[in-house]
Image: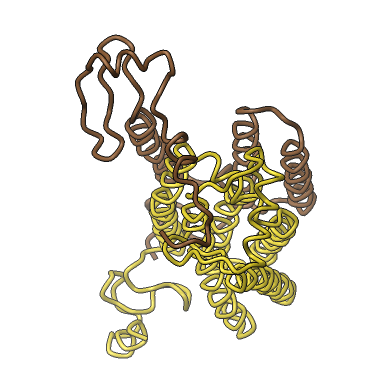
Amino acid sequence: MDHSSGEEYDVHAHVTSVRTYILVFAALLALTGLTVLAYNVRLGDYNLLVAVLIATLKASLVCTWFMHLKYEKAFNTAFFVGSLIFVGVFFAYTMNDTSERTRVNEFSGGRIDPKTGGYTHGTAPVLAEQGSEELSLEAKESSDAAEPGSPE
Amino acid sequence: MTTEAVASSAPPGGDHHHDSGHHGPEFLAHHFDTPVQQFDAAKLGMWLFLAQEVLFFSGLFVAYAVFRNWYPAAFSVGSHLLDWRMGALNTVVLLLSSFTAAMAVRSSQQGNQKQTSTYLIITIVCAFAFMVVKYFEYSHKIHVGILPGSLWNPTAEGLEEVKAAAATSYVGEGLPYHIRTFFGIYFVMTGLHGIHVLVGIGVFIWILKRNMRGEFTREHFTAVDISALYWHLVDLIWIYLFPLLYLID
């Protein structure tokens, strides 16, 4: 067999100690408890942020220790982390579009049509509505809030 | 199989090039030079697959974000229709199974065949437990007609539940139309995740059989390792699904 390349021949993986695995597992359980606790504290919009942050902390624990990313080749890690970066791009562009629909631009008075996503130029009535903030989908939602069982 | 076929036709003790069959341990496929190369290739392939899985699920997570942003009231009521204790129980079950999967890999790395089997069995049992809890949740929702989109058709009992959920959510009175949209997201996301759990059960049963046949050694535990990687990803998805679906104010 040609070993002259100097590379390793047999697989020698890093073996993590049982203690580490138990500690990680305990931390994951504790963080799950913390998620439920945080849910019962009224933080308004921050509830979502806190929940996602705790979930991300749990996810990094699983990746680092259970999935051995700590000892993984940088090349493999790059693929996985790279996919997460692209999820971020996907998320940012989509939210940037969809969350702005119906919102009136305070400078131009124009707004994005909620159905098409197309831009509507500002008109006097729209400008007049600015005081009442936005023709939000929320308002639309409650206006057609029918009894869920009833036919449409 | 191909390796053996080539080996029998190749001259024994011939040259050391790729065209000769037996050039290393039994498990080494003929297109790899060394076990390390074979192991690294398998790991790279698995990480690529996991990256694909992340992107695959990301479409649903983005859809979730868009609809939650548009219909916060409906998501609040919808979430209150789910029993967070069921979700929390399943989170614990799945975290435990991830722990035992990691322990199975560790045992396999050390060539402890018996212990590997034990941990694999616990992992499979946890996966089944997860599906049983999911079954109870789904069957109740179907029973009371709390279903996605055009299937939305609550029975009298279901409607009472929806009203009670609205009362405990910040919405109070009035039922947002788009609760059905929340359940569209809920059923598709947890359904797709559930399919992944079922696939994981199948994979681990196969790995368990191979382990009991003694196929894995200290030098060759690749299949156990990458199956566990898959399982951890399934766990990762659930770590996000639990607070996003069950714990909305």
Q: Nearer the viewer, residue A62 or B112?
A: A62
Q: Which chain, by letter, is brown? A: A
Horizontal arrangement in the rendering, residue A140 relative to residue B230 (left or right): left
Horizontal arrangement in the rendering, residue B201 relative to residue A130 (left or right): right
Give the residue drawn at x 28%, y 40%: A115
Q: Say whether residue B230 is visible.
A: no
Say above or below: B163 vs A134.
Answer: below
Give the residue drawn at x 67%, y 42%: B169
Q: Nearer the viewer, residue B12 or B46?
A: B46
Say above or below: A13 vs B136.
Answer: above
Task: Name the quarter where the C terminus of chain B is drawn.
Answer: top right
Q: Say whether residue B84 is visible.
A: yes
Give the residue drawn at x 57%, y 79%: B215
Q: Nearer the viewer, residue B30 or B175?
A: B175
Residue B37, percent across and down? Answer: 41, 59
Give the residue drawn at x 70%, y 75%: B121
Q: Nearer the viewer, residue B127 or B134?
A: B134
Residue B212, percent across and down? Answer: 64, 83
Task: Name the quarter where the N terminus of chain B is drawn.
Answer: bottom left
Residue A130, percent across and down? Answer: 37, 15
Q: Which chain, by letter, is yellow? A: B
Say above or below: A21 vs A56.
Answer: below
